């Protein structure tokens, strides 16, 4: 299992990019599965950084840096998918009501704007939060297990 944590960072990020692209496709442009991917990515980042023997400041900066990279990759996909669609806002004949998005704000145009903001900005941010949350839970679990093992040896 430790071989997984010793792979090259570039190869690991390439694997992440392939999986994230696949999950964007499964969600048909809605990054729900990409947000959920933040949980295993956070676990992986925490385990990898802990096994490298770094101090806590380096571990947390490593996790934050790569969490931002993963969310920026999802953000890039969302801009590529939803950016051209947002040009409907300058089209006076655009039919927002029949575009197929949920009417979350009761007005078709306002709902469309809310949907674009949700997809492009909020979803990658949610992925960042899930990755950091999963990393912190993993680090807490690891430190608790290490503490129990250390106390058992005394």
Image: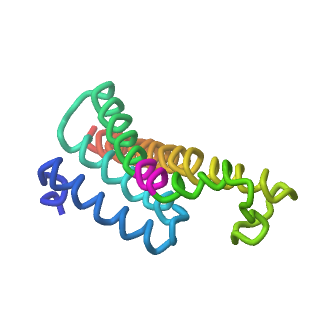
User: In the image, 57: left or right of 5?
Assistant: right
**Measured along the vertical axis of the image, is residue 32 above or below residue 152?**
below
Q: Is residue 75 magenta?
A: yes
Question: Magenta span: helix, strand or loop, mainly?
Answer: helix
Image spot of residue 19 (x, y percent): 33, 66
Point 72% across, 56% down: residue: 112
**Measured along the vertical axis of the image, is residue 49 above or below residue 4?**
above
Point 70% across, 50% down: residue: 113
Range shown magenta? 74-80
Point 75% across, 63% down: residue: 96
User: In the image, 26: left or right of 93?
Assistant: left
Q: Residue 106 is drawn in which quadrant?
A: bottom right
Q: Quadrant of the C terminus?
A: top left
Task: Please identify the residue farthest to the right as the structure is shown.
Answer: 106
Image spot of residue 66 (x, y percent): 32, 41
Q: Nearer the viewer, residue 111 or 99?
A: 99
Q: Quadrant of the N terminus?
A: bottom left
Task: Please identify the residue farthest to the bottom as the structure is shown.
Answer: 26
Q: Nearer the viewer, residue 76 or 50?
A: 76
Q: Nearer the viewer, residue 25 or 153?
A: 25
């Amino acid at each position: 299992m430790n071989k997984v944590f010793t792979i090259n960072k570039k190869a690991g990020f390439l694997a992440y990019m392939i999986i994230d692209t696949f999950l964007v496709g499964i969600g048909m442009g809605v990054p729900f599965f990409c947000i959920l991917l933040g949980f295993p990515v956070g676990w992986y980042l925490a385990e990898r950084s802990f096994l490298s023997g770094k101090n806590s400041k380096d571990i947390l900066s490593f996790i934050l840096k790569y969490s931002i990279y993963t969310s920026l990759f999802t953000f890039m996909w969302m801009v590529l998918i939803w950016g051209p669609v947002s040009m409907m806002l300058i089209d006076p004949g655009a039919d927002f009501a029949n575009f197929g998005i949920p009417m979350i704000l009761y007005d078709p145009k306002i709902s469309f704007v809310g949907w674009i903001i949700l997809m492009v900005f909020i979803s990658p941010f949610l992925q960042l939060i899930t990755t950091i949350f999963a990393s912190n839970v993993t680090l807490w679990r690891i430190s608790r297990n290490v503490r129990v093992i250390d106390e058992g040896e005394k």
